[in-house]
């Protein structure tokens, strides 16, 4: 379009820009509105069809069917951490179809493993059976070690922490100096074959661990708590009594001693690097509430804590769960519709 030129007087020249044609902008707005409208209609039709299908479904599940053996074998091949042990000393009854996870807490003395194990055992379906290899006969050779492991993971090991039939996770704590490093090749092979999760628990502050080791060794003979020795205290008074002892530390060998402990932890991690493992630190568990909560709820080894009772499935609850999984709820569709209408109006105003 040619420009319009106006002459006001002899000294003034005004050039007026050409008018923009609204046809192009209107076409763009129209196409945009059509695309948005088609998209919204498709989403609404999907939701209507899904709701209709759910309403006409006749779901009647009276009891949970027994799992197919072929399906179980496929799951175990894909997820080797799921097991269905068959104890020789008792029957699991209604819990025989519930999977069990195997774990082992690998740690050092005076690293908080007792407190950590108490935290795990606070769950109704988790059994951590203590420091079972503290008895020398059980770790005399690799054969006795394997026999003990099989007994624990077959749920035939009975302690005060045993949950028996409905255990969803079973394990124990194992110190590095109790035959673990000596027979690490066979133990790593056993862990990988049986799908055992290794939970490494160490302390960041190795100096405090050393002080705890020296204090515990002194109390073993001094017996400060009413003439008895306790490796773990359960009250502030007991802790204050034990902390009254101030051990003497050899400053000459201090650095080399701490380095030796650190290298022992690094060596253990290298040996068990091929296993399914996780590294935890005592200080993190004590100070971090989120980590502590995750530990107590067994998210560490993803324990599927299942109810042993046979329950019926409510068809209405099932339909409600399907409705909750829809890709785009109806209120969201209305919101987007209103948003696009406002956007179109703004375009029209600009034109």
Image (cartoon, rainbow, N blue to C red):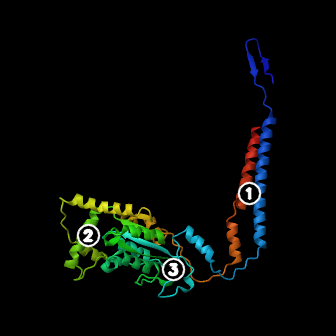
Image quadrant assignment for residue 21: top right
- Is residue 249 visible in the rendered structure shown here? yes
For marks 3 and 1, the one nearer the N-term is 3
Image quadrant assignment for residue 175: bottom left
Q: Residues within 10 Å of mark 3 (few under 14, many from 20)?
A: some
Mark 3 = which residue? 85
Image quadrant in which the C terminus is located: top right
Q: Position of residue 75 (x, y in %)?
A: 58, 71
Mark 2 = which residue? 213
**Residue drawn 50% across and 84% down?**
165
For marks 2 and 1, the one nearer the N-term is 2
Q: Position of residue 301 (x, y in %)?
A: 48, 69
Q: Position of residue 235 (x, y in %)?
A: 32, 77
Query: Do the residues under discs 2 and 1 have CB atoms within 8 angstroms?
Result: no
Q: Secondary structure at mark 2?
A: helix
Q: How far, Cα to Cα, is label 2 from label 1?
A: 66 Å
**Residue drawn 28% across and 79% down?**
230
Image quadrant in which the N terminus is located: top right
Q: Residues within 10 Å of mark 2 (few under 14, many from 20)?
A: some
Q: Position of residue 170 (x, y in %)?
A: 46, 77
Task: Give the vertical position of 244 relative to 90 (above or below).
Answer: above
Q: How far, Cα to Cα, is label 3 from label 2?
A: 38 Å
For marks 3 and 2, the one nearer the N-term is 3
Q: How far, Cα to Cα, is label 3 from label 1?
A: 53 Å
């Amino acid at each position: 379009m040619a420009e319009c030129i106006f002459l006001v007087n002899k000294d003034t020249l005004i050039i007026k820009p050409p008018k923009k044609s609204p046809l192009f902008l209107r076409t763009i707005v129209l196409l945009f509105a059509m695309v948005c409208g088609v998209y919204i209609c498709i989403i609404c039709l999907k939701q209507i069809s899904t709701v209709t299908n759910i309403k006409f479904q006749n779901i009647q599940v009276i009891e949970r069917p027994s799992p197919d053996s072929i399906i179980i074998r496929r799951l175990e091949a894909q997820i080797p951490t799921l097991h269905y042990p068959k104890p020789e000393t008792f029957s699991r009854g209604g819990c025989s179809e519930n999977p069990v996870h195997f774990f082992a807490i690998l740690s050092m003395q005076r690293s908080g493993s007792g407190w950590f194990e108490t935290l795990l055992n606070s769950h109704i379906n988790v059994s951590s059976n203590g420091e079972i290899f503290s008895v020398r006969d059980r770790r005399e050779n690799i054969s006795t070690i394997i026999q003990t492991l099989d007994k624990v993971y077959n749920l035939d090991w009975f302690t005060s922490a045993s949950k028996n039939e409905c255990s969803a996770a079973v394990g124990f704590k194992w110190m590095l100096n109790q035959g673990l490093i000596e027979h690490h090749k066979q133990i790593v092979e056993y862990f990988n074959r049986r799908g055992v999760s290794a939970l490494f628990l160490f302390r960041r502050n190795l100096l405090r661990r050393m002080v705890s080791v020296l204090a515990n060794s002194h109390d073993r003979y001094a017996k400060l708590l009413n003439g008895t020795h306790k490796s773990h205290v359960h009250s502030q008074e007991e802790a204050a009594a034990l902390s009254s002892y101030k051990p003497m530390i050899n400053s000459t060998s201090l650095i080399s001693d701490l380095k030796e402990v650190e290298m022992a932890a690094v060596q253990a991690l290298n040996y068990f690097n091929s296993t399914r493992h996780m590294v935890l630190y005592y200080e993190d568990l004590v100070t971090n509430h989120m980590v502590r909560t995750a530990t107590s709820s067994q998210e560490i080894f993803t324990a599927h804590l299942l109810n042993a009772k046979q329950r019926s499935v409510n068809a209405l609850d099932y339909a409600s769960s399907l409705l909750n999984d829809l890709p785009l709820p109806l209120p969201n569709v209305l919101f987007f519709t209103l948003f696009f209408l406002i956007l179109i109006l703004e375009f029209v105003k600009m034109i």
